[in-house]
Amino acid sequence: MATHVITGAGSGIGAAIAERLAERGDEVWLWARDAGRARELESRHPGARTLVGDLSEPDRLSWALGHQSPPDRVDSLIHSAGVIELGSVGELTPKVWHATLATNLIAPAELTRLLLPQLRAARGHVVFVNSGAGLHAYGEWGAYAASKFGLRALADALRGEEAPNGVRVTTVYPGRTATPMQEKVHQQEGREYDPDRWLTPRDVATTVLAALDLPRGAEVTDLTVRPTG
């Protein structure tokens, strides 16, 4: 039975990944921002265990994890949490930039650092759920795209550093996916939201599991998945 730590499991892609892994009998640890959220996740995902720490405050993650008992080995660390705020470069404030980079880039880097001993022990797998915005930046998407471009660089650097330790690293770039975040994006864009046009969270979860389930001698470094039609 494999052990997985997942961020962003409260909804959308992260929740779908947690459900798929639990369905096949794996041990799932879900990252929660506070104790109340942890109780919600445990209720939604029976049998799951939780770890608590606010990803918007990455400087405090080491302290938070040090007061808990994480698993001794981690077969996969899946970064699915993220925040978004659209706006032009001429309008975005430093507060938005800091908040976006803290949650989308610095927190994944810090959480990976903190769990590297367990990942190395398991010869595990780090999966970054990125975005199409991590490959192409468009107007009004500057802060979010910058965080996702940075996440891509983090993954590439980590892969080169940890290959000698047997740790695999995969980045998944989903296109638009029917999640609460996508609904918020449509509101900010002033567009009508039709979830049937987009990928489902389980589509992306299937892509993540395909990467995880490759034989030990193989590694997918980058996967792009898009809605058809």
Image (cartoon, grey):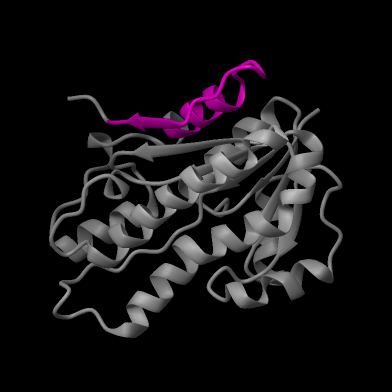
The one nearer the camera, 55 or 17, is 55
Q: Residue at x 47, y 61 (%)?
A: 105
Give the image location of residue 94, x and y in percent.
32, 84
User: Residue 166's image quarter?
Assistant: top right
The one nearer the camera, 44 or 210, is 210
Q: Residue at x 48, y 66 (%)?
A: 103
**Is 206 covered by the magenta stretch?**
yes
- In-image side of 38 versus 150 (left or right): right
User: Residue 69's image quarter?
Assistant: bottom right
| Start-end of magenta stretch | 204-226
* Looking at the image, residue 136 lies above or below residue 140: above
The one nearer the camera, 203 or 89, is 89
* Looking at the image, residue 22 lies above or below residue 50: above
Q: Residue at x 74, y 60 (%)?
A: 51
The one nearer the camera, 45 or 8, is 8
Look at the image and tell me in which quarter the C terminus lies.
Answer: top left
Give the image location of residue 97, x and y in percent.
34, 75
User: Residue 60's image quarter?
Assistant: bottom right
Give the image location of residue 198, x and y in percent.
27, 37
* Looking at the image, residue 186 lies above or below residue 21: below
**Is 31 covered by the magenta stretch?**
no
